[in-house]
């Protein structure tokens, strides 16, 4: 670094003594990119941190006064501009939950890596009162047959979208008021998301123990297959749009010109097919346009903001054959799950307690894994309403000459929004400087673990400076078994879900992480391999729903696996073998 280069990002957090360890485990899946200052201020600090605090108090993990600064909890830290999950805090689930350990929590929620520090026990971690309250939460999670609060949140989220006012007609004051009014909505949705997510590993954990007890641990993954999740729904809708496109000469020609040209070409056409497709695509965006890469950050372009991303995925499905339809693959996955469940029932026959635990675990797994995805979708819809509202304010600032592109409005903090409205001149240079540094953060690889000490930017490796020796024929890479089955195909390393053009139907998708915006790319793929991800990671859940093999937590898979190599993916064993180059 040069003498004048900043050594920290201005939004970076401080570390307290009570919760010293923080991890990119699972955060790299949900927060893959640097997080914008406005997103940090409104979404992370005001909505998500408060939501996690309230969820943990509700299920019995800890009390209000056990948090550091409970009135303004900083539970998702930022270092080098990247978001980190609270490793020390989450381990309290294992320390206080009956029959669970901090190590088991690590395996359930975070990547299994050698650089993860050992759990540091503290006298205050032990609490019979919290253990009893958590036992009650566990009992509820293993016995309830419905999550009506998530259905209520879904109805509220959909109403938000369908009742959106004409943002262009609102005054600046009304725009900012609308944006700020959405923050407590996001907080409430996220509280439910964290409550469900924190208990979602109980059912799968019980299934894993039962399968190990009968001598076949691999059965547990297959028992989690075919679970309906909201984040896979856009893929089914995209498949239908792809079939419509494949059946029309006019639409095929528009897609052949590339995803950037599709909408303009169809809008210029007087074809009934073109008008029909555009109407269908408008309905698709109304239902699913909130999805985005790094979708918890308001700066990220959702499908509504940048339709090209969705159109590129639809183009992939247009070129896929009927055997890859997600509905058929899902039905096959459900049939395999039911077959394995029947095997387990046979093995457990005669043991009433084990059978009872098995049925409860199956119900809890289906309900909470699908509930976890529904809760996330609710959050994402509300965040997109915040996103488009702030983008309209940014558009006006561009029109007034305050900033030169909409995205720079997200370099402001919440307190600075009003100053941008009334007296923007003092902030214009500040926003430019932040933007320059923010963009530079994308070139850096964040350290995986932060423990006791805040790292400087100089401790983050430049991505273009990383080098590894790629795997050779016969090499076997290991990761976490995510979704059962074996598939062989050409490896395609895709680093950006918005640019999947190298991926072809029948390829093996090799990706750095897979938030919901990646899901459409699963449909044409025969298998998925990702750098990160634990038991409940998005890649695993959606791969099981679609019935394709998945191996997660293959460290540096996108660098180690040669693009174009033939690979064999064993989702049950958690291995990737290089077959040919």
Image (cartoon, grey):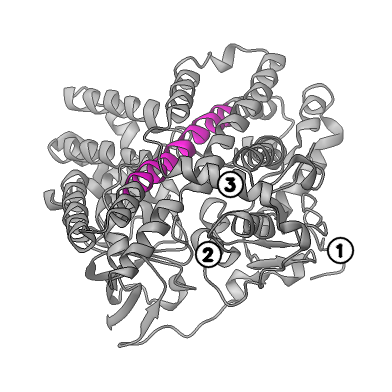
Q: In the image, is residue 524 above or below residue 195?
A: below
Q: Is residue 491 visible?
A: no
The location of residue 12, given as percent across then percent down, is 77, 53
Compared across the picture, whether 101 is left or right of 267 comes to: right
Per the image, the residue denoted by label 2 is 104
Residue 308 appears at what percent x and percent y? 39, 41
Query: The residue tagged with tag 3: helix, strand or loop?
Result: helix
Image coordinates of residue 298 in percent, x first then y, are: 60, 38
Q: Residue at x 72, y 15 (%)?
A: 173
- Observer-nearest residue: 493 or 423? 493
User: Magenta residues?
Assistant: 362-388
Residue 62 counted in the magenta span: no
Residue 242, above or below 555? above
Query: Percent position (x, y) of residue 246?
Result: 16, 41
Disc 1/disc 3 C-alpha distance (Å): 51 Å
Circle number at residue 134: 3
- Look at mark 1 in the image and give the residue it sits on: 4
- At x 24%, y 23%, the residue is 275
């Amino acid at each position: 670094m040069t003498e004048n280069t900043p050594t920290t990002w201005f939004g970076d957090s401080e570390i307290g003594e009570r919760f010293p360890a923080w991890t990119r485990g699972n955060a790299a899946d949900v927060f893959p990119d640097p997080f914008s200052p406005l997103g940090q201020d409104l979404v992370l600090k005001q909505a998500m941190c408060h939501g996690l605090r309230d969820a943990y108090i509700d299920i019995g993990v800890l009390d209000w006064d056990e948090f550091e600064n409970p009135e303004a909890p900083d539970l998702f830290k930022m270092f080098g501009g990247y978001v980190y999950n609270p490793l020390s805090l989450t381990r309290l689930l294992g320390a206080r939950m009956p029959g669970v350990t901090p190590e088991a929590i690590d395996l359930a929620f975070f990547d299994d890596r050698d650089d993860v520090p050992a759990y540091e026990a503290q006298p205050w971690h032990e609490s019979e009162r919290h253990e009893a309250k958590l036992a009650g939460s566990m009992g509820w999670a293993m016995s309830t047959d419905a999550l009506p609060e998530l259905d209520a949140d879904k109805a509220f989220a959909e109403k938000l979208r369908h009742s959106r006012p004409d943002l262009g007609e609102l005054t600046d004051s009304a725009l900012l008021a609308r944006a700020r009014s959405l923050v407590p909505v996001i907080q409430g949705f996220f509280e439910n998301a964290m409550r469900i997510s924190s208990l979602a590993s109980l059912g799968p954990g019980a299934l894993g123990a039962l399968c190990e007890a009968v001598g076949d641990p691999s059965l547990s993954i297959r028992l989690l297959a075919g679970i309906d999740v909201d984040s896979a729904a856009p893929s089914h809708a995209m498949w239908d749009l792809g079939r419509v496109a494949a059946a029309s000469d006019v639409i095929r020609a528009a897609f052949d010109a590339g995803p950037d040209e599709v909408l303009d070409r169809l809008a210029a056409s007087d074809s009934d097919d073109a008008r029909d497709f555009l109407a269908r695509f408008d309905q698709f965006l109304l239902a699913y346009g909130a999805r985005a890469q790094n979708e918890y950050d308001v700066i990220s372009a959702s499908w509504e903001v940048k339709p090209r991303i969705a159109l590129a995925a639809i183009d992939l499905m247009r070129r896929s054959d009927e055997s890859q339809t997600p509905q058929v693959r899902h039905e096959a996955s459900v049939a395999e799950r039911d077959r394995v469940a029947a095997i387990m029932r046979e093995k457990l026959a005669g043991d009433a307690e084990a059978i009872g635990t098995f049925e409860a675990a199956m119900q809890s797994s289906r309900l909470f894994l699908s509930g976890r995805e529904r809760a996330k979708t609710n959050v994402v819809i509300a965040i997109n309403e915040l996103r488009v509202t702030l983008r309209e304010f940014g558009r006006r600032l561009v029109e007034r000459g305050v900033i030169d592109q909409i995205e720079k409005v997200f370099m402001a903090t919440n307190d600075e929004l009003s100053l941008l409205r009334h007296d923007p001149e003092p902030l214009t240079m500040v926003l430019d400087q932040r933007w320059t540094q923010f963009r530079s953060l994308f070139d850096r690889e964040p350290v995986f673990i932060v423990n006791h000490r805040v790292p400087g930017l100089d401790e983050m490796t430049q991505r273009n400076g990383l080098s590894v020796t790629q795997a050779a024929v016969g090499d076997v890479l290991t990761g976490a078994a995510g979704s059962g089955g074996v598939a062989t195909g050409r490896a395609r390393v895709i680093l950006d879900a918005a640019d999947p053009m190298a991926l072809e139907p029948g390829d093996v998708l090799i990706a750095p992480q897979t938030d919901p915006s990646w899901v459409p790319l699963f449909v044409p793929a025969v298998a998925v391999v990702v750098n990160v991800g634990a038991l409940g990671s998005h890649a695993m859940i959606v791969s099981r729903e679609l019935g394709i093999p998945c191996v997660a937590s293959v460290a540096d898979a996108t660098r180690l696996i040669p693009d174009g190599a033939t690979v064999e993916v064993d989702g049950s064993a958690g291995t990737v073998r290089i077959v040919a180059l």
